[in-house]
Amino acid sequence: MTEHSAYTPYHPRWHRTRVSTYWWLGRGSYFLFILRELSSLAVAWFVIDLLVLVSAIAKGDAAYQQFLDWSGHPFVLALNIVSFAFVTLHAVTWFNLAPQAMVVKVAGKRVPGALIAGSNYAALAVVSLVILALLLTRW
Amino acid sequence: MGDHITLQVARYRPEKESDIRFEDFELPCPKEWVVLDGLNHIKDRMDGTLSFRWSCRMGICGSCGMLVNGEPKLTCATFLSDYAPGPVRVEPLRNFPVIRDLIVDIGDFMGKLTRIKPWIVRASEKPLSEGEYRQTPEELEDFKQFSMCINCMLCYSACPIYGLDPHFIGPAAIAVAQRYNLDSRDEGAAERMQILSQHDGIWGCTFVGECTKVCPKHVDPAGAIQRYKLQSALEWVKAFVLPRAAQ
């Protein structure tokens, strides 16, 4: 309805501000949002890394050793450290946002948000501990 | 300075300017004055041509939303003394076309609001003789938060997605849709889902979350949108797993 109106003295023209390409640099929260969106690339990278690892194990000891050597390369190591930081950001931000998306009711009462976020963290801790236990019992 | 503060007010006069420019006004700053009081002081005593919207002065009408130092705020609820010693920059809401000075065109939002059918939709009305549609306090509690929306559009101003894609239906419209969906008297959820599950509906949102932060009424539009997404995804899964039951 406003799209086709022409300017007359009684029908003003609108001033439209273009959104800057760098809009996400203007505010801390926008920047954090963009980092969170970018963190999905780190998640994708770890999925690829894991698939390459599984494939290397399937191919035998030599391929596995080659994978380990490649993983120890400073560039890959640096990439993995940065990716780990991003994946941590990804997990923390999404766990913290979970209570907004999930409304869980128990006996007619809404479960408090802290409990929903807390149970996500608890699940992460349990899974991490199980993996740690598996690793420790292997060696 | 002390008891005075400078207001840098955005001016746009389409009949003689092609761009927004700022004008400084030196104002008294009593501790009970809000930004809107400052603007009214300018209009009454200093420059009667300053144009801005306002009505109730008490956070109900949703007319006086503006950017105060870059933050979307209700100017009737933003104290000048919180910004002392100033200066305080007052601009029209971001992401909307400016008509004059601090007044933006709200036509786009109004159109979007009606698209989501913000009223109780019934397949059939029961006869008056059967009395009113009754609701328990728990049923009221389910949607009450979303019914607090005053259509002030601060959330649209805070939403970068709306800024980048004006077709996005936006936070308040979705929160208001949710207000009616969650109302036990309403039967229009499927109709609204038709509209909101389209490309410019809920899936346009990437959960920046700023809409919830700026909302003066604690409506949590970001939460409403994510709940909607969850519901929409569950319905899709249900239709996929049980195609017959979904029909």
Image (spheres, grey):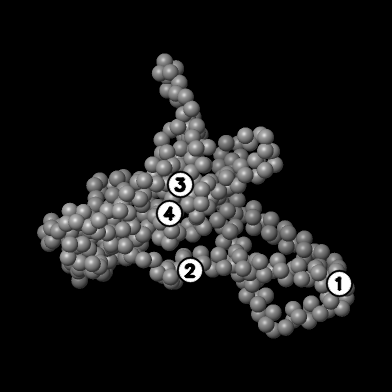
Residue B225 image position (x, y, % from top left): 50, 49
Tag 2 secondary structure: helix
Mark 4: which amino acid?
A: His
Q: Residues within 10 Å of mark 2 (few under 14, many from 20)?
A: some
> Do discs 3 and 1 belong to a common subunit?
no
Q: Residues within 10 Å of mark 3 (few under 14, many from 20)?
A: many
* Letter of the chain that mark 4 sits on in the rendering: B
| Residue position marked by numbered label 3 in the rendering | B174
Discs 2/4, front: 4
Earlier residue among tags 1 and 2: 2
Mark 3: which amino acid?
A: Ile
| Residue position marked by numbered label 1 in the rendering | A59
Query: Image height check: is B197 above or below A95?
Result: above
Kindly report the distance in space between the C-alpha atoms of the residues bearing marks 1 and 4.
51 Å
> Do discs 1 and 4 belong to a common subunit?
no
Residue at 44% over, 50% down: B169
